[in-house]
Amino acid sequence: MTPKKFLAIAAAAVITCLSFTQAAQAGPRLDKIMETKTIRVGTPGDYRPFAIKTDAGFSGHDIDVIETMAKELGVKIEYVQTSWPNLTKDLQADKFDVAVGGITRNVTRMRLFDMLPGYAPFGKVALVRSADKAKYTSVDALNQPTVRVIKNPGGTNETFVLANLKAAQVSTHDKNAEIPALIADGKGDVMITETYEALHYAKADPRLHAAFVDAPLTPKNYLGFMVPTDDADYTRVMGFVWGLIESRGAIQQAATKWLK
């Protein structure tokens, strides 16, 4: 054996040993979840129909999906309530292992975290009173000094309002789930939200109308579950479990139950 060939074999052996060592040490988040049999799920819990907290607990599309995933993992769920303004920093601070509840997939979030496959295609729309629906046919019609816009802080809906409705009267209400009733009661005129939330409230209250559903104010996007990037094994397994339950029809069942 030539010295050159010997060195090549020795180098390959070292790399193999390092790979096995790294594999043995990898996966601290996944290991903790499997050892404690608990996955911590963070959600604002105020965004119907994806995740809403009531006296009975959490429910919604994303709750059904994450509970199916937890069952496949063989673990229980510990819910951690967060808020849209605190969602990013709470996940960075390791307060939970996955964030759910109608979270838009975008570059800003993908720079910080990983996100599971997209679901529920949507665009930004407006929730308005049915009696006023003829008034609101464009962004320009929304962006008027006489129009009262109520926004929830911390999410992409607020980002849209601040960027596009600068001429309107914009106020902030911390509890997202309360804003539709404020619009219906005439305490505001417009809530910028997304397709499914607007449709949910318009169906629940005939005083409300989901405007721009057929021609959203933004290009089509998707929602996704957000996970930290500190454990490649955890991200890989979560992606695998998502694909597995999707292949069995669980994602479609949740969509049929909550999004139709």
Image (spheres, grey):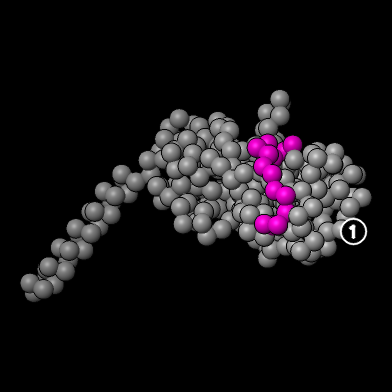
Q: Residue at x 67, y 60 (%)?
A: 164
Mark 1 surroundings within 10 Å by alpha-carbon count, few (fewer than 14), some (14 through 19), many (20 or more): few
Q: Amino acid at mark 1?
A: Ala
Q: Which residue is mark 1?
A: 134
Q: Residue at x 23, y 54 (%)?
A: 17
Task: Read off the magenta span.
Answer: 165-178
Residue 136 percent location from the top left of the image:
83, 59
- Frontmost residue, 89 versus 52: 89
Is 12 placed above or below 232 here? below
Q: Residue at x 25, y 57 (%)?
A: 16
- Frontmost residue, 88 versus 75: 88
Q: Is residue 122 shown to the viewer in this render?
A: no
Residue 217 on the magenta segment: no
Residue 118 percent location from the top left of the image:
61, 57
Residue at disc 1, secondary structure: helix
Going by the picture, which residue comes out furthest to the left? 3
Q: Is residue 181 shown to the viewer in this render?
A: yes
Residue 174 on the magenta segment: yes
Q: Residue at x 67, y 54 (%)?
A: 161
Q: Is residue 89 left or right of residue 23?
A: right
Residue 225 percent location from the top left of the image:
57, 48
